[in-house]
Image (cartoon, grey):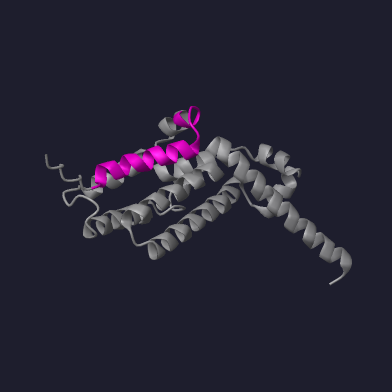
C-alpha cells in the first residue's frame, strides 16, 4: 500500500471518530432530535463525508446507541459478578446508570425510559436491564438486607420511572448528577432495606 493510500485511510479513520464524538455530544444535548448537519459541523466535516461513513442519520445514531448499550451491560455484568453485597451492588449499578446519563445525556434518558423512536426499540434490551435490577433485589432478599415482602416487579418499574425524561431533565437543571445519583440510590435503598428493630427501652 502506498503512502498516499495509508494517509487517506488514516484521514478516514480520524473523520469517522470525529463524527462519532460529535454525534455523542449532539445526542447528549438533543436526544433523537439530533440533526446531522449540526453533527457534521461539530466534527468539522461536510455532510458528504458523514454519509460516506454512515448511510443515514439512523445508522449513525445506531452506532452511538449500540456503543452506549454495550458499555453499560458490560459494566453492569462486571459489577454483578464481582460485588457480592446487594446493597453495594445496587449503589454501583445506579452509579453506572447516571454515569451514562452524564456521558450520553438525553440519549440515555430516552433509551432507559423507553421513549425512543420505534426504529431504535431493539438497541437497548430493557427487559434485560430490568432483569439486572430484579436479580439484585432478589439477591438482597436472600442476603437478608432487603424486605422479603417487596413487590419486585413494582420496585423495578419505580427504578425506571425515576429516569422519566421530563422529570429528570428538569431536575438536572437544579442539581448536579452526582447529587441526583446519591439521592436516587438512597431513596431506592430506603424502600428496599429491612427496617432496623426498635431499640429496647
Considering only vertical position in the picture, is 112 above or below 139? above
Q: Nearer the viewer, residue 44 or 90?
A: 90
Visible residue check, residue 141: yes
- Residue visible at 78% across and 60% down? 10
Q: Main secondary structure of the magenta part?
A: helix
- Residue visible at 51% across and 57% down? 71
Which residue in the rendered view is the most extreme toward the front? 201
Which residue in the rendered view is the most extreme toward the right? 3
- Residue visible at 46% across and 28% down? 170
Q: Position of residue 41 (x, y in %)?
A: 72, 39
Any magenta on residue 183? yes
Q: Position of residue 62 (x, y in %)?
A: 55, 51
Q: Nearer the viewer, residue 13 or 55?
A: 13
Region of the chain picked out in magenta, as a range? 171-193
Q: Quadrant of residue 134?
A: bottom left
Left or right side of 84 for 66: right
**Quarter of the figure that contains the C terminus:** top left
Q: Nearer the viewer, residue 31 or 196?
A: 196
**Quarter of the figure that contains the N terminus:** bottom right
Q: Position of residue 143 (x, y in %)?
A: 24, 59
Which residue in the rendered view is the most extreme toward the left? 201
- Residue visible at 74% across and 55% down? 14
Considering only vertical position in the picture, is 165 above or below 139? above
Q: Quadrant of residue 155?
A: top left
Which residue in the rendered view is the most extreme toward the bottom? 1
Any magenta on residue 201? no
Visible residue check, residue 130: no
Q: Position of residue 147 (x, y in %)?
A: 20, 49
Amino acid at each position: 500500500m502506498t503512502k498516499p493510500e495509508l494517509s487517506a485511510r488514516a484521514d478516514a479513520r480520524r473523520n469517522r471518530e470525529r463524527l462519532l464524538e460529535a454525534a455523542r455530544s449532539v445526542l447528549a444535548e438533543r436526544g433523537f432530535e439530533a440533526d446531522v448537519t449540526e453533527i457534521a459541523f461539530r466534527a468539522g466535516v461536510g455532510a458528504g463525508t458523514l454519509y460516506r461513513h454512515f448511510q443515514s442519520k439512523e445508522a449513525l445514531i445506531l452506532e452511538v446507541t449500540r456503543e452506549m448499550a454495550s458499555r453499560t451491560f458490560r459494566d453492569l455484568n462486571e459489577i454483578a459478578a464481582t460485588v457480592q453485597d446487594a446493597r453495594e451492588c445496587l449503589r454501583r449499578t445506579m452509579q453506572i446508570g447516571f454515569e451514562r446519563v452524564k456521558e450520553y445525556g438525553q440519549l440515555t434518558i430516552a433509551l432507559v425510559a423507553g421513549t425512543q423512536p420505534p426504529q431504535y426499540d431493539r438497541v437497548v434490551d430493557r427487559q434485560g436491564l430490568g432483569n439486572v435490577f430484579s436479580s439484585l433485589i432478589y439477591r438482597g432478599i436472600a442476603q437478608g438486607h432487603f424486605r422479603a415482602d417487596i413487590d419486585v416487579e413494582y420496585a423495578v418499574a419505580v427504578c425506571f420511572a425515576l429516569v422519566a425524561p421530563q422529570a429528570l431533565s428538569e431536575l438536572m437543571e437544579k442539581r448536579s448528577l452526582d447529587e441526583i445519583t446519591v439521592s436516587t440510590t438512597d431513596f431506592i435503598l430506603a424502600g428496599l432495606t429491612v427496617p432496623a428493630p426498635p431499640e429496647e427501652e
